[in-house]
Amino acid sequence: MSATKKKPGLYANIHAKQERIAHGSGERMRAPGAAGAPSQEAFREVEKTAKTKKATRKPRRSAGG
């Protein structure tokens, strides 16, 4: 493990803020394009490093059913 802690990502920050808002923090989400809001470029950069979801397998049927 490295000695430095990894900062939370863009989506982690967005979801954390949505949770705070849901619990009555009084905050508001910034409008797209507003100062301090994530840019489209930030979302494109995140897409490059996003993990893909693994395909889930369907449960097997029993043979004696």
Image (cartoon, grey):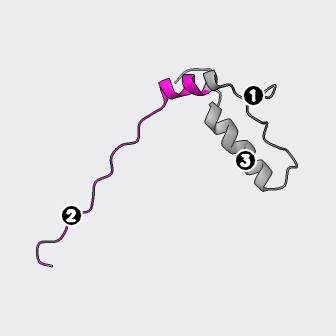
Q: Which residue is mark 3?
A: 18
Q: Which residues are magenta?
A: 43-64
Distance between the alpha carbons at the discs numbered 2 and 3: 38 Å
Residue that extends furthest to the right in the rendered view of this protein: 26
Q: Which residue is mark 2?
A: 60
Q: Secondary structure at mark 3?
A: helix
- In terms of sequence position, does the residue under pointer 1 or pointer 3 come before the other? 3
Magenta highlight: main SS = loop
Residue 35 quadrant:
top right
- In terms of sequence position, does the residue under pointer 1 or pointer 2 come before the other? 1
| Mark sitting on residue 49 | none
Q: Residues within 10 Å of mark 2 (few under 14, many from 20)?
A: few
Q: In which quadrant will I find the C terminus?
A: bottom left
Q: Residues within 10 Å of mark 1 (few under 14, many from 20)?
A: few
Q: Is residue 12 left or right of residue 52?
A: right
- Amino acid type, mark 1: Gly
Q: Relative to 64, does residue 38 appear above or below in the rendering?
A: above
Q: Where residue 63 sits: x, y (%)?
A: 11, 72
Q: Is residue 5 visible?
A: no
Q: Relative to 61, does residue 1 appear above or below in the rendering?
A: above
